[in-house]
Image: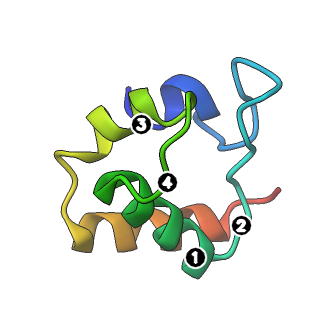
Amino acid sequence: KGCAGCHGADGKTTIMPVYPKIAGQSATYLLAQMKDIKSGTRANGQTAVMKGIIAGVSEEEMKAIAEWLSTLQP
């Protein structure tokens, strides 16, 4: 399920109100967040699950995900 498991298939229907809506965000911002979570630079209680998911995602895949999410309607 990856990102959609918490952020929703559309990037804006989150399963909990505290999870950010990622649809329509800047690709640069989204990529930076994914890189920071993967490296451990960004670590808080909400990133633990994401760190496990993003561990298997390459930088090229992260770029593609960020670009795609940025095209979605917020």
Name the residue beneath numbered marker 3.
50
Between marks 3 and 4, how big is the CA–CA gap?
Answer: 11 Å
In the rendering, at what x and y percent does residue 48 appear? 42, 30
Amino acid type assigned to the residue bearing label 3 in the image: Met
Q: Residues within 10 Å of mark 2 (few under 14, many from 20)?
A: some
In the rendering, at what x and y percent does residue 21 appear? 75, 45
Of the two numbered discs 3 and 2 on the same chain, state the one appearing first in sequence. Answer: 2
- The reply, left or right, for residue 3 in relation to residue 35 is right
Quadrant where the N terminus sits is top left
- The reply, left or right, for residue 23 in relation to residue 47 is right
Amino acid type assigned to the residue bearing label 2 in the image: Gln
From the viewer's perspective, is the residue at label 3 or at label 2 nearer? Answer: 3
Query: In this view of the protein, can residue 8 be seen by the observer?
Result: no
- Are circles 1 and 2 on residues that touch, CB within 8 Å? yes
Quadrant where the C terminus sits is bottom right
From the viewer's perspective, is the residue at label 1 or at label 4 nearer? Answer: 4
From the viewer's perspective, is the residue at label 2 or at label 4 nearer? Answer: 4
Of the two numbered discs 1 and 3 on the same chain, state the one appearing first in sequence. Answer: 1
Name the residue beneath numbered marker 2.
25
Between marks 1 and 2, how big is the CA–CA gap?
Answer: 6 Å
Between marks 1 and 4, how big is the CA–CA gap?
Answer: 17 Å
Name the residue beneath numbered marker 1.
27
Residue sitting at x 61%, y 74%: 29
Of the two numbered discs 1 and 4 on the same chain, state the one appearing first in sequence. Answer: 1
- Are circles 3 and 4 on residues that touch, CB within 8 Å? no
Q: Residue pushed farthest bottom? A: 28
From the viewer's perspective, is the residue at label 3 or at label 4 nearer? Answer: 4
Amino acid type assigned to the residue bearing label 4 in the image: Arg
Q: Residue pushed farthest top? A: 15
